[in-house]
Amino acid sequence: MENDESLIENNHVMELTSINNESVFCRSCGKSIKRDAEICPYCGVRQTATQKKNPGLAAIASFFFSGLGQIYNGEIGKGFFLIGVQIINVFLMVIFIGFITFPLVWVYGVYDAYKTAERLNSM
Ligand SMILES: [Zn+2]
C-alpha cells in the first residue's frame, strides 16, 4: 500500500514538472524554481552539478605535453599559449637558451595545471 502511494506521489510530481516547463523543483528544498536557475534562491544549493577536475590528470597531461593540462582545465587560450611558447623554446635550443626556458615552462605547466584543477574544484 505504501509503495502504491509513493508511486502516485511521484507521478503527480512528474506531471507538475512537465506541465510547467519554466520551473523545476529544487533538488534540496523542493521549492519551485526556474529551470535555468543554477542556484536555488531559497536554500542556496547549486542545482547543476559542477564538473570536477582531476588535478592529477591535469598535471599528467601537462607532464606529457605542455598546455594539455590547461586545455583539460578549460583554459584553452592558456593551453595554446603554452604550446606556442614551447615551440619557440624548441627553436631556442639552437642557441642553447631553450635548454633553460623549455624545462622552466614545462615545470610551470605541470604545476599550474594541478593548482588550477584544485582551484576549479573548490569553486
Ligand atoms: Zn532549494
Image (cartoon, rainbow, N blue to C red):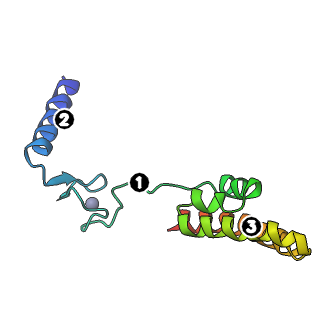
User: Toward the viewer: 35 or 57?
Assistant: 57
The circle drawn on residue 76 is none
Q: CA distance from mark 3 to mark 2?
A: 56 Å
Compared to residue 61, the image places residue 110 above or below, namely below
The local crowd at label 3, few if under 14, some if 14 to 19, many if 20 or more residues have their Cα within 10 Å, is: many
Q: Secondary structure at mark 1?
A: loop
Of pointers 1 and 3, the one earlier in the residue sequence: 1
* Residue hosting label 3: 86
Q: What amino acid type is highlighted by mark number 1?
A: Ala
Disc with the residue nearer the chain's start (3 vs 2)? 2
The residue lying at 21 percent from left, 27 percent from top is 2
Q: Would residue 16 appear left or right of 99 to someone viewing this image?
A: left
Q: Closer to us: mark 2 or mark 1?
A: 1
Q: Is residue 88 visible?
A: yes
User: In screen coordinates, is 45 left or right of 41?
Assistant: right
Numbered circle sitting on residue 10: 2
Determine whether 20 is above or below 107 in the image. above
Q: Nearer the viewer, residue 90 or 40?
A: 90
Q: Is residue 29 left or right of residue 46?
A: left
One can see residue 75 in this view: no
The amino acid sitting under disc 2 is: Asn
Q: Residue at x 48, y 55 (%)?
A: 51
The residue sitting at 73% across, 65% down in the picture is: 87
Disc 2 within 8 angstroms of ligand 1 (CB): no
User: Crowding near pointer 2: few (<14 within 10 Å), some, many (20+)?
Assistant: few
Mark closer to the observer (3, 2): 3
- SS class of the residue under badge 3? helix
As measured in the structure, the alpha-carbon distance from the residue carrying label 1 to the one carrying label 3 is 35 Å
Q: Nearer the viewer, residue 102 or 11?
A: 102
Task: Name the kind of residue labelled 3 in the image.
Answer: Gln
Location of residue 122 (image quadrant):
bottom right
Q: Which residue is mark 1?
A: 49
